Image: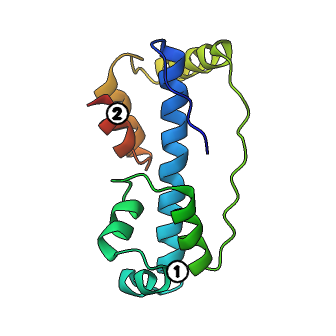
Amino acid sequence: MTIARAGCCRGSRVRLYIILTMVRFIYRQLREVRLEKGMTLPQLSSMTGIAQPNLSRIETGKVDARYSTLARIARALSLELALSSPDVLTVADVKARMAEGAQRLAERGIAARDVEQRLAWKRARGVDTSVEQRLLG
Protein backbone atom coordinates (compact mmCIF):
# COMPACT_ATOMS: atom_id res chain seq x y z
CA MET A 1 0.00 0.00 0.00
CA THR A 2 1.41 3.35 -0.95
CA ILE A 3 0.39 6.48 0.85
CA ALA A 4 1.24 9.60 -1.05
CA ARG A 5 2.59 12.47 0.96
CA ALA A 6 -0.29 14.77 1.80
CA GLY A 7 -0.01 18.29 0.48
CA CYS A 8 -1.52 21.40 1.90
CA CYS A 9 -4.86 21.29 0.12
CA ARG A 10 -8.06 19.91 1.65
CA GLY A 11 -8.32 17.21 -1.03
CA SER A 12 -5.08 15.64 0.19
CA ARG A 13 -6.35 15.49 3.77
CA VAL A 14 -9.53 13.81 2.58
CA ARG A 15 -7.55 11.18 0.63
CA LEU A 16 -5.28 10.53 3.63
CA TYR A 17 -8.33 10.22 5.92
CA ILE A 18 -9.90 7.68 3.53
CA ILE A 19 -6.68 5.64 3.41
CA LEU A 20 -6.32 5.67 7.20
CA THR A 21 -9.94 4.58 7.57
CA MET A 22 -9.33 1.67 5.17
CA VAL A 23 -6.22 0.56 7.07
CA ARG A 24 -8.01 0.66 10.42
CA PHE A 25 -10.86 -1.34 8.89
CA ILE A 26 -8.33 -4.06 7.98
CA TYR A 27 -7.03 -4.08 11.57
CA ARG A 28 -10.57 -4.48 12.95
CA GLN A 29 -11.30 -7.29 10.46
CA LEU A 30 -8.21 -9.21 11.56
CA ARG A 31 -9.30 -8.93 15.19
CA GLU A 32 -12.85 -10.06 14.39
CA VAL A 33 -11.59 -13.11 12.48
CA ARG A 34 -9.23 -13.99 15.34
CA LEU A 35 -12.10 -13.83 17.83
CA GLU A 36 -14.42 -15.83 15.53
CA LYS A 37 -11.78 -18.57 15.39
CA GLY A 38 -11.59 -18.53 19.21
CA MET A 39 -7.92 -17.59 19.09
CA THR A 40 -6.31 -15.55 21.87
CA LEU A 41 -3.61 -12.93 21.41
CA PRO A 42 -0.99 -15.18 23.06
CA GLN A 43 -1.87 -17.97 20.61
CA LEU A 44 -1.64 -15.62 17.62
CA SER A 45 1.62 -14.26 18.99
CA SER A 46 3.19 -17.72 19.14
CA MET A 47 2.00 -18.48 15.59
CA THR A 48 3.32 -15.24 14.08
CA GLY A 49 6.36 -14.44 16.21
CA ILE A 50 4.91 -10.96 16.84
CA ALA A 51 4.88 -9.83 20.46
CA GLN A 52 1.44 -9.86 22.07
CA PRO A 53 1.49 -6.13 22.98
CA ASN A 54 2.33 -5.29 19.35
CA LEU A 55 -0.57 -7.42 18.09
CA SER A 56 -2.89 -5.63 20.48
CA ARG A 57 -1.67 -2.22 19.27
CA ILE A 58 -2.16 -3.28 15.65
CA GLU A 59 -5.70 -4.56 16.26
CA THR A 60 -6.69 -1.35 18.03
CA GLY A 61 -5.10 0.88 15.39
CA LYS A 62 -2.60 2.44 17.79
CA VAL A 63 0.30 1.57 15.47
CA ASP A 64 0.51 1.12 11.74
CA ALA A 65 1.79 -2.28 10.69
CA ARG A 66 3.87 -3.03 7.62
CA TYR A 67 2.36 -5.12 4.87
CA SER A 68 4.69 -8.00 5.76
CA THR A 69 3.41 -7.95 9.35
CA LEU A 70 -0.21 -7.95 8.21
CA ALA A 71 0.58 -10.83 5.85
CA ARG A 72 2.03 -12.89 8.75
CA ILE A 73 -1.10 -12.27 10.81
CA ALA A 74 -3.38 -13.10 7.88
CA ARG A 75 -1.45 -16.31 7.15
CA ALA A 76 -1.80 -17.41 10.80
CA LEU A 77 -5.55 -16.79 10.55
CA SER A 78 -5.74 -18.75 7.25
CA LEU A 79 -6.67 -15.60 5.34
CA GLU A 80 -5.45 -14.24 2.05
CA LEU A 81 -4.37 -10.63 2.29
CA ALA A 82 -5.00 -8.87 -1.00
CA LEU A 83 -4.82 -5.13 -1.39
CA SER A 84 -6.04 -3.44 -4.50
CA SER A 85 -6.04 0.14 -5.64
CA PRO A 86 -9.28 1.92 -4.84
CA ASP A 87 -10.95 4.05 -7.46
CA VAL A 88 -9.28 7.41 -7.70
CA LEU A 89 -11.42 10.27 -6.50
CA THR A 90 -10.92 13.66 -8.02
CA VAL A 91 -11.29 16.86 -6.02
CA ALA A 92 -14.57 17.43 -7.90
CA ASP A 93 -15.81 13.99 -6.76
CA VAL A 94 -14.96 14.78 -3.15
CA LYS A 95 -16.64 18.19 -3.35
CA ALA A 96 -19.77 16.61 -4.86
CA ARG A 97 -19.89 14.00 -2.09
CA MET A 98 -19.41 16.70 0.53
CA ALA A 99 -22.31 18.70 -0.97
CA GLU A 100 -24.53 15.58 -0.99
CA GLY A 101 -23.63 14.87 2.62
CA ALA A 102 -24.35 18.47 3.63
CA GLN A 103 -27.73 18.25 1.92
CA ARG A 104 -28.60 14.99 3.72
CA LEU A 105 -27.63 16.56 7.03
CA ALA A 106 -29.66 19.69 6.28
CA GLU A 107 -32.71 17.50 5.58
CA ARG A 108 -32.34 16.19 9.13
CA GLY A 109 -31.87 19.64 10.63
CA ILE A 110 -28.13 19.24 11.23
CA ALA A 111 -25.74 21.98 10.17
CA ALA A 112 -22.85 20.54 8.14
CA ARG A 113 -20.30 22.47 10.19
CA ASP A 114 -21.78 21.37 13.55
CA VAL A 115 -19.30 18.57 14.20
CA GLU A 116 -20.67 17.52 17.59
CA GLN A 117 -24.25 17.26 16.35
CA ARG A 118 -23.15 15.35 13.23
CA LEU A 119 -21.07 12.88 15.27
CA ALA A 120 -23.92 12.40 17.76
CA TRP A 121 -26.24 11.59 14.85
CA LYS A 122 -23.76 9.04 13.49
CA ARG A 123 -23.30 7.42 16.92
CA ALA A 124 -27.08 7.17 17.33
CA ARG A 125 -27.14 5.18 14.08
CA GLY A 126 -24.42 2.82 15.40
CA VAL A 127 -21.55 4.28 13.37
CA ASP A 128 -18.09 4.08 14.95
CA THR A 129 -16.80 7.67 15.06
CA SER A 130 -13.59 7.06 17.01
CA VAL A 131 -11.26 7.60 14.05
CA GLU A 132 -13.06 10.77 13.02
CA GLN A 133 -12.94 12.09 16.58
CA ARG A 134 -9.19 11.44 16.81
CA LEU A 135 -8.56 13.16 13.47
CA LEU A 136 -10.62 16.16 14.52
CA GLY A 137 -8.64 16.41 17.75
Q: Amino acid at mark 1?
A: Glu
Q: Is residue 131 left or right of residue 23?
A: left
Q: Residue at x 63, y 14 (%)?
A: 91
- Residue position for label 2: 135
Q: Mark 2 Cα within 10 Å, few/some/many (few <14, many 20+)?
A: few
Could you tell me which quadrant the C terminus lies in?
top left
Residue kind at label 2, given as amino acid type: Leu
SS label for mark 1: helix
For the point 54% across and 17% down, the residue is 11
Residue 10: image x %, image y %? 48, 15
N-terminal label among 2 and 1: 1
Report the disc number at residue 36. Answer: 1
Residue drawn 61% across the image and 45% down it: 1
Badge 1: residue crowd in 10 Å (few <14, some 14–19, many ≥20): few
Q: Are marks 2 and 1 in contact (CB under 8 Å)?
A: no
Q: In the image, is residue 47 above or below residue 62?
A: below
The residue shown at (47%, 87%) is: 38
Which residue is more in the foreground, 125 or 62?
62
How far apart marks 2 and 1 lie (CA) works out to 30 Å
